Image: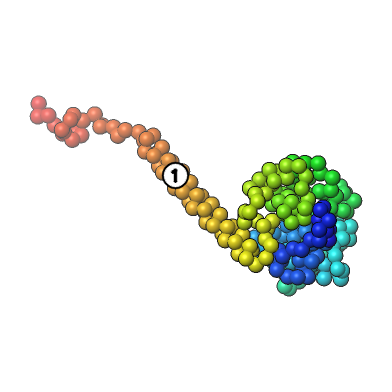
Amino acid sequence: MTTSDSGKDITLRIAQNPEADELLGRSPLAALVGMLLDQQVPMEWAFTGPYTLAERMGSDDLDAGRIAAYDPDAFTELFTTKPALHRYPGSMAQRVQQLCQFLVAEYGGDASAVWRNAATGAELLERLNALPGFGEQKARIFLALLGKQFGVRPTGWRGAAGPYGEAGSHRSVADITGPESLVEVRAYKQEAKRTAKTAAKTAARTAKSAEAAKQRGGASPRKSGGSSPGKSAGQSTGK
């Protein structure tokens, strides 16, 4: 993975760390693991994770077979050792190991086989969606990363990646090519979170108002208790 499908050398600037970015550019598994770790932590922290993990394993690359067979407790310790590899090191260690076990079982441990020979973007999206820890959004973002920065561009890849595949966008890690674009992507993600939070609050208020209106509309009318208009209950008529 030192060169793209077009034969050009791949230079990444996602982790904002030369050694970590160099590993991402040449190691398909490192790229997949970085994408897996990219949740609830800064993007550069997530994509530095594969390099740190390789160092702690005493290697210059990640090996799916070795990780798949690693003692689970010992592997978790690689993540939890300070500085931790993730905000949730224990759960992410388990997910990385599950990903590697899947790659061994389905692709012979070759991470690049996930996208190799995928005829269409839809086929590639389906393969990525099947990876442990990869939901639809993460699969689309990684598909966009493959297309935009690794030259993996099966027919219809932009459409399969959804909005993340749009040219000139700054929506995800797929669009990070240096410090400036990192700032733009982070600003977009923060604004998206604010918008989602506002929408959630508005929806909650609307639901609350609708429920209150429903309760008012369903209230039983008060009974008069049989008294005559203008006279209180039990008042004598004088006759």
- Residue furthest to the left in view is 238
**Which of the 4 image quadrants contains residue 10?**
bottom right
In the rendering, at what x and y percent does residue 57 appear? 85, 68
What is the three-letter code of the residue carrying label 1?
Answer: Thr
Q: Which secondary structure, mark 1?
A: helix
Front-lying residue, 208 or 135: 135
* 49, 220: nearer the viewer: 49
Q: Which residue does the numbered mark 1 point to in the structure image?
A: 206
- State the image quarter where residue 155 is shown: top right
Above or below, comparing residue 110 to residue 18 in the picture: above
Residue positioned 86% across, 68% down in the render: 60
Q: Identify which residue is drawn at 81% across, 58% down.
A: 8
Left or right, 96 with respect to 167, comes to: right
Q: Nearer the viewer, residue 16 or 200?
A: 16
158 relative to 191 in the view: left or right: right
Image quadrant holding the N terminus, namely bottom right
Quadrant location of residue 87? bottom right
Q: Residues within 10 Å of mark 1 (few under 14, many from 20)?
A: few
Q: Is residue 223 above or below residue 174?
A: above
- Residue extending farthest to the top is 239
Position in image of residue 32 (x %, y %):
77, 56
The figure's colour scheme reads: rainbow
Measured as percent of width and height from the top left, residue 156 is found at 73, 42
Q: Quadrant of the C terminus?
A: top left
Above or below, comparing residue 7 to residue 76 in the picture: above
Instruction: Judge from the rendering whether residue 231 lies leftward or rightward of residue 6; answer left or right.
Output: left
Q: Residue at x 74, y 66 (%)?
A: 48
